[in-house]
Amino acid sequence: MRQNIGIYGGTFNPIHIGHLIAAQDAIGHLRLDRLFWVPSARPPHKRSVGLASAEDRCALIASAIGGDPRMAVCRWEIERGGVSYTVETVRRFRSEYPRARLFFLIGADSLYELHTWREVGAILDLCRVATFERPGYPIRADRIRLPRPWAARLMAHRVPGHEIGVSSTEIRRRLAVGRPIRYLVPAAVEALIRERGLYGSLRTRAAGRANGRAEPH
């Protein structure tokens, strides 16, 4: 029996409940047997300012998914180092899982930027690209700037998602000023962030002790 394997790439800086709910949606809608979280070493389309170390981000993902047997952390891009290009990762998955159906998971914003990705034609030949669709914002084929038949094929793999107003940027900002992040990330993720002093949380904790304030939760 052929496996359905999901590839979920990103910085995950840090991972939060929105990422986890999206992963759950993908597993259910695409009938995935396994979903691999692939944290990037250095993403080509994003600034690296405020990016936690690869080891810290991998540890946060591992703590978030816990013992869920459907999910695992893939360190290939971290081990490869340098700028993380999707085509290299997908080729590695195709080599490791030659008979599997591969689904590379992206957001709608990335879908409309696919024409700028390195060797996008090879990516589309090697795997199915599945897009998370936000409620109230249907994906538009006319905004996909790729030649036929790719637009039609990309429209065939859409994952209905949830409207979740949580972002990694917001979480980093809240930590930097000492605001709580409880319920925005799993408890294990918050504990690890504070233990390692990530995203300004160590500075906030020290300032709180110095001023006689209790550490925020």
Image (cartoon, rainbow, N blue to C red):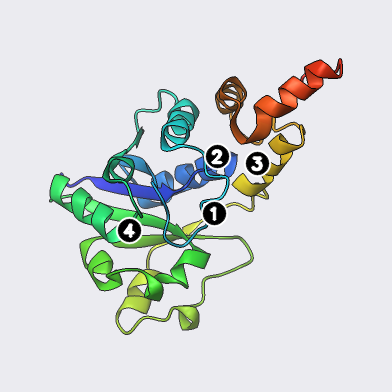
Residue bearing the label numbered 4: 85
The earlier-in-sequence mark between 4 and 3 is 4
| Residue type (three-letter) at the residue carrying disc 2 | Pro
Q: Residue at x 66, y 33 (%)?
A: 200
Residue 214: in sight, yes or no?
A: no
Mark 1–mark 2 Cα distance, whole angstroms, equals 20 Å
| Residue type (three-letter) at the residue carrying disc 3 | Arg
Is 21 left, or right, of 127 in this rendering?
right
Quadrant in the picture for the C terminus: top right
Q: Residue at x 42, y 81 (%)?
A: 145
The earlier-in-sequence mark between 3 and 2 is 2
Which dot marks residue 14? 2
Rendered position, 150 above or below 210 = below
Rendered position, 52 above or below 114 = above
What percent of the width, then of the height, locates residue 3? 22, 45
Q: Are marks 4 and 1 in contact (CB under 8 Å)?
A: no
Q: Which callout, 1 or 3, points to the residue nearer the camera?
A: 3
Q: Secondary structure at mark 1?
A: loop
Q: Secondary structure at mark 3?
A: helix
Mark 4–mark 1 Cα distance, whole angstroms, equals 25 Å
